[in-house]
Image (cartoon, grey):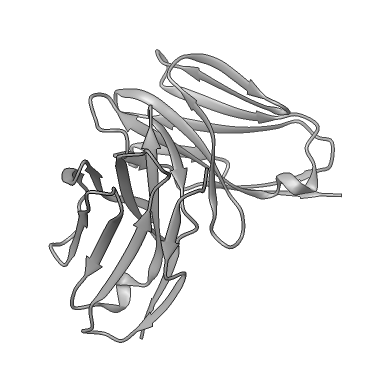
Amino acid sequence: KAGVTQTPRYLIKTRGQQVTLSCSPISGHRSVSWYQQTPGQGLQFLFEYFSETQRNKGNFPGRFSGRQFSNSRSEMNVSTLELGDSALYLCASSANNEQFFGPGTRLTVL
Amino acid sequence: KNEVEQSPQNLTAQEGEFITINCSYSVGISALHWLQQHPGGGIVSLFMLSSGKKKHGRLIATINIQEKHSSLHITASHPRDSAVYICAALNYGGSQGNLIFGKGTKLSVKP
């Protein structure tokens, strides 16, 4: 089975722009979660989707949003980018409480 | 105080040494994950525990629910074990992706 894939792997944006990141889960997995990793805060939960519904949301501003499609692929969007949004964004698909992480998208905001 | 605390933050060992990384949590959990992250960012899930002990090769993970404490042990450590090890708690009643992470333990194993 193919693993979790994320695109793009690297991204450079400027402040004020918006960005969309994509995550394709392992085939058959219906749960996709997104995480942000920064040197200061470490890993933090952003949100989780299951069968196209947001099941949980972490403590992030409304500029961070996401969605899930009927094929379980998920996207997250960050609007009005700030310097502090520079981070590694990871998604994970899960089944039976086991998490399978993608390689991440490294976002740099200039 | 963080809800999930790891110790030590950094650990340097000689090849062959026995290594222990500790994780304490203050929330009620339904499971605890141990994750491994190599330079470059990729994360691999090593264990998911809700009670007792699990073993995979040279890695052993234990959890004591009453004491809210988990440990990850590496026997006969090897330079390829050098990575950041992260514990993550799944809140009791929470959905499976809603994890609370420790800050990680950076392990360096010298040959």
| Residue B105 or residue A8, whichever sits in front | A8
| Residue B46 or residue B105, whichever sits in front | B46
Determine whether, in the image, residue B55 is placed left or right of residue A48.
Answer: right
Compared to residue A103, the image places residue A33 above or below, namely: above
The number of callouts visible is: 0
Q: Indicate the quadrant where residue B92 lies.
A: top left
| Residue A4 or residue A107, whichever sits in front | A4
The residue most toward the left is: A62
Name which residue lies at 24% across and 30% down.
B94
Compared to residue B34, the image places residue A77 above or below, namely: below
Point out residue A97 in the picture as x, y percentages from the top left corner.
38, 29
Determine whether, in the image, residue B15 is placed left or right of residue A98.
Answer: right
Determine whether, in the image, residue B90 is placed left or right of residue B87.
Answer: left
The residue most toward the right is: B111
Quadrant of the frame with the C terminus of chain A: bottom left
Name which residue lies at 39% across and 67% down.
A87
Q: Indicate the quadrant where residue B5 lies.
A: top left
Point out residue A45 in the picture as x, y percentages from the top left corner.
30, 49
Point out residue A84 in the picture as x, y percentages from the top left corner.
31, 72
Name which residue lies at 23% across and 24% down.
B93
Name which residue lies at 42% across and 61% down.
A6
Point out residue B40 in the picture as x, y percentages from the top left corner.
58, 63
